[in-house]
């Protein structure tokens, strides 16, 4: 394993000394990095990556991948959402404080992204966005619904880097 | 036989020779994997990031102008993907702290799995995982990958002074963490 030895000598703190101290500690404790994966793994990695490149560059495969990974879950999410909205009316004050706190920290964009992401695949976009009842729901109600139905992972996946950064800042503030 | 350079292979890929890209992957996949592994601290995610890095590189080969080496370009992609993953893990970490993860992601992970995973995880990986994003980045790039502050600065778009401070804190924190773990 190759550890940095600070040979550039351009650090203002005594970098070499600190690095050596850490190296000594690691050596003395016998702590090692995880083992390098086997040769078979590297071969499989090549094959797997090539296959994914093929998928990414093939129009047909893109359609299949898109349907499997995005469109179908999207439609399922929309249907679940509509059914949920029909049957579920969140009652303020009935939720656990931790849940409400974290959920309310989600930026509006994060919540909206789920709707827009899934809705953009088909004509349901119009019906969702213009649905009078849905538009009457508060951000907290939408967030509660999404979380209770386990869609937060989808929300997180759909966030932009900037949104994730904003979320982290907001959550940091809450934690402090 | 003289080895073909990365740039020559890139040209071959651009001319439609797909096997040339396989050769580029063969040359660099190990280092890219370890960059990702050290950033994110787990094999499965590192594996995925490694693949994503090469897919992104293949699809974006037109953007590679050759100003830096092919590996540096690849490395930058891997770092950015890793940082994105670290940020997402950070958000998930907050949600775990709020003890609502199991409600959010039913069936995706359970506490038993997580415990088992933690036990097999390297102590060093855990030490690195507790570092804030920027400290983690500079630690991985300098301690393991022997990069100069100038190179790191070019990738992370952070001042050299800031990088030095981050590295200093990172070294200290990893040492302290190891002291308590050992």
Image: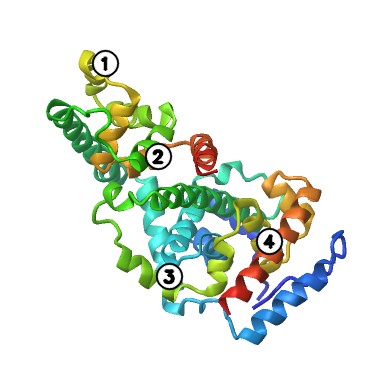
The subunit letter for the residue under badge 4 reads: B
For marks 1 and 4, give the CA distance.
48 Å
Quickly name the residue at label 4.
B170
Picture quadrant of residue A46:
bottom left
Q: Is residue A35 above or below residue A99?
A: below
Q: Residue at x 78, y 59 (%)?
A: B148
**Residue at disc 3, secondary structure:** helix
Q: Are marks 4 and 3 on the same chain?
A: yes
For marks 2 and 3, give the CA distance.
25 Å
Q: Are marks 2 and 1 on the same chain?
A: yes
Q: Are marks 4 and 2 on the same chain?
A: no
For marks 2 and 1, give the CA distance.
22 Å
Within 10 Å of disc 2 (Cα), the crowding (few <14, some 14-19, many 20+) is some
Within 10 Å of disc 4 (Cα), the crowding (few <14, some 14-19, many 20+) is many
Is B158 placed left or right of A83 in the picture? right
The subunit letter for the residue under badge 2 reads: A
Q: Residue at x 39, y 53 (%)?
A: B96
Q: Quadrant of the C terminus of chain A?
A: top right
Q: Earlier in the sequence, mark 4 or mark 3?
A: 3
Is mark 4 in CB contact (under 8 Å) with mark 3? no
Q: Are marks 3 and 1 on the same chain?
A: no
Of B131 and B66, nearer the camera is B131
Residue B84 locus on image (x, y percent): 51, 47
Quickly name the residue at label 3.
B118
**Residue at disc 4, secondary structure:** helix
Residue A44 locus on image (x, y percent): 40, 70
Q: Comparing marks 2 and 3, which lies closer to the viewer?
A: 2
Q: What is the number of the mark on residue A136? A: 1
Quickly name the residue at label 2.
A102
Of B134 and B12, nearer the camera is B134
Within 10 Å of disc 1 (Cα), the crowding (few <14, some 14-19, many 20+) is few
The subunit letter for the residue under badge 1 reads: A
């Amino acid at each position: 394993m190759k550890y940095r030895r600070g040979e550039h000598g351009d650090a203002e703190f005594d970098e070499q000394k600190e690095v050596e101290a850490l190296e000594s500690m690691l050596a003395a404790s016998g702590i090692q990095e995880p083992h390098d994966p086997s040769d078979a793994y590297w071969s499989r990695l090549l094959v797997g990556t090539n296959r994914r490149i093929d998928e990414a560059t093939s129009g047909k495969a893109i359609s299949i991948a898109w349907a499997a990974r995005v469109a179908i879950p999207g439609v399922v999410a929309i249907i679940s959402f509509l059914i949920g909205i029909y049957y579920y009316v969140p009652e303020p004050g009935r939720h656990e404080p931790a849940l409400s706190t974290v959920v309310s920290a989600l930026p509006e964009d994060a919540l909206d992204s789920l709707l827009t992401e899934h809705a953009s695949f088909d004509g349901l976009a119009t019906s969702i966005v213009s649905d009078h009842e849905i538009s009457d729901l508060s951000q907290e109600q939408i967030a509660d619904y999404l979380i209770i139905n386990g869609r937060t992972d989808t929300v997180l996946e759909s966030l932009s880097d900037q949104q994730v950064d904003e979320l982290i800042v907001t959550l940091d503030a809450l934690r402090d | 036989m003289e080895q073909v350079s990365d740039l020559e292979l890139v040209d071959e890929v651009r001319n439609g020779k797909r096997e040339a890209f396989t050769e580029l992957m063969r040359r660099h996949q190990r280092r890219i994997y370890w960059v990702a592994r050290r950033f994110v601290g787990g094999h499965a995610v590192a594996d995925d990031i490694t693949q994503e890095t090469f897919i992104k590189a293949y699809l974006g080969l037109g953007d590679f102008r050759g100003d830096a080496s092919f590996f540096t370009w690849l490395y930058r992609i891997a770092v950015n993907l890793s940082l994105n993953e670290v940020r997402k893990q950070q958000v998930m970490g907050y949600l775990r702290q709020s003890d609502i993860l199991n409600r959010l992601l039913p069936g995706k992970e359970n506490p038993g799995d997580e415990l088992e995973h933690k036990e097999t995880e390297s102590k060093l990986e855990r030490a690195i995982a507790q570092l804030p994003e920027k400290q983690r980045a500079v630690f991985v790039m300098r301690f393991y990958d022997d990069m100069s502050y100038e190179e790191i600065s070019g990738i992370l778009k952070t001042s050299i002074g800031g990088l030095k401070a981050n590295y200093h804190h990172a070294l200290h924190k990893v040492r302290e963490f190891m002291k308590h773990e050992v």
